[in-house]
Image (spheres, rainbow, N blue to C red):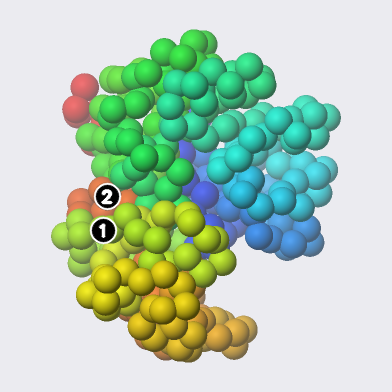
Amino acid sequence: MIFDLRYPIFQAPTGSVAGPELCSAVTQAGGMGAMGLTWASSDDAVAAVRAVRDATSGLFQANFALAFEPESLSAVLDAGLPVVTFSWGDPTPYVSTVRRSAAKFGVQVTNGLGARRAVDLGADFLVCQGVEAGGHVQANRSLWDILAGVVDAAGNVPVVAAGGIADGGGIARALATGASGAMLGTRFVATVESRAHPEYKARLLESEGQTALTLCFDGGWKQSAQRVLRNSTLETWESCGSPAAGSRPGEGETIGFSASGEAILRYEEVAPRIGFSGDIEAMCLYAGAGVGVIRDLPTAAEAIERLWREAQTQE
């Protein structure tokens, strides 16, 4: 099994809704938990890593989106982060920093060329992302159109399939295509340990799979397409012709507040978390294309055990 995990199931680093609680629960259950630490201060990032290390002795990862400077990278490696992944940029300048630690590193890729470059850098594994992924989407082709080519280009380097996988059938298909594991995001957002707002979780469960790949919610990360649930903000924007920033309906309007009282503006890319108030439905509700099969809110451990049972019945 990849990295000697009990199950080849990876939690996607779904930004602020994936805190130490979810990360450690996934790892403790036999998968690999994850946190997104791109925007975390060094102090907050180190505290998160230490919280997970205190809760479990297993492997977990932190992701850094290289469209932004990974300011806390050295600090979390010094704190004992065991696995780091890079996406949205060239990891070359940071490889030496990782190699000075004991950590393994992975690179998110979307085609065979990217896979070969990552292998040449010495990546310990690759994450092959398809356009079906929720959140910020680096890919522009279906996972199932690119996975076999990425696996071939990776050679002996393990590949983890990501994008729209939300049940055991998707995991089984990824493994049958040559992947060594599968990464799931939305399935783990809809778990007990996730920091997602209860209404956000409820809307994931109610969804019939109606997602959109859009530039609507680009406040804070310009020109990054996001896959989200369809909601009132998106549909009003589309009905007005999908205007650019500066001409969007309701732009600058406060639609809610964070737990600390910070205003949440319409079109911000911030996913609603526990403690948020206001018009939760109108906020950015990230979801992968596989959301339509998610119908309950289990613990992370329950989700992993069920996913693996489902995957085995597909073989």
Q: Position of residue 46 (x, y in %)?
A: 75, 55
Q: Is residue 120 above or below residue 199?
A: above
Residue at point 30% right, 20% down? 177
Residue at point 27% right, 71% down? 241
Q: Position of residue 88 (x, y in %)?
A: 56, 43
Q: Position of residue 140 (x, y in %)?
A: 36, 40
The kind of residue on which mark 1 rests is: Thr
Please give left or right for residue 34 compared with residue 9 in the image. Answer: right
Residue at point 79% right, 29% down? 96
Residue ID for mark 1:
211
Circles 2 and 1: CB atoms closer than 8 Å: yes
Quarter assignment of residue 203: bottom left
Residue placed most toward the observer, 195 or 216? 216
Please give left or right for residue 302 compared with residue 94 in the image. Answer: left
Q: Judge the density around disc 2: few (<14), some (14-19), many (≥20) Cα neighbours within 10 Å.
A: many
Residue farthest left in this picture:
208
Judging from the image, what secondary structure is the residue with disc 1 in? strand
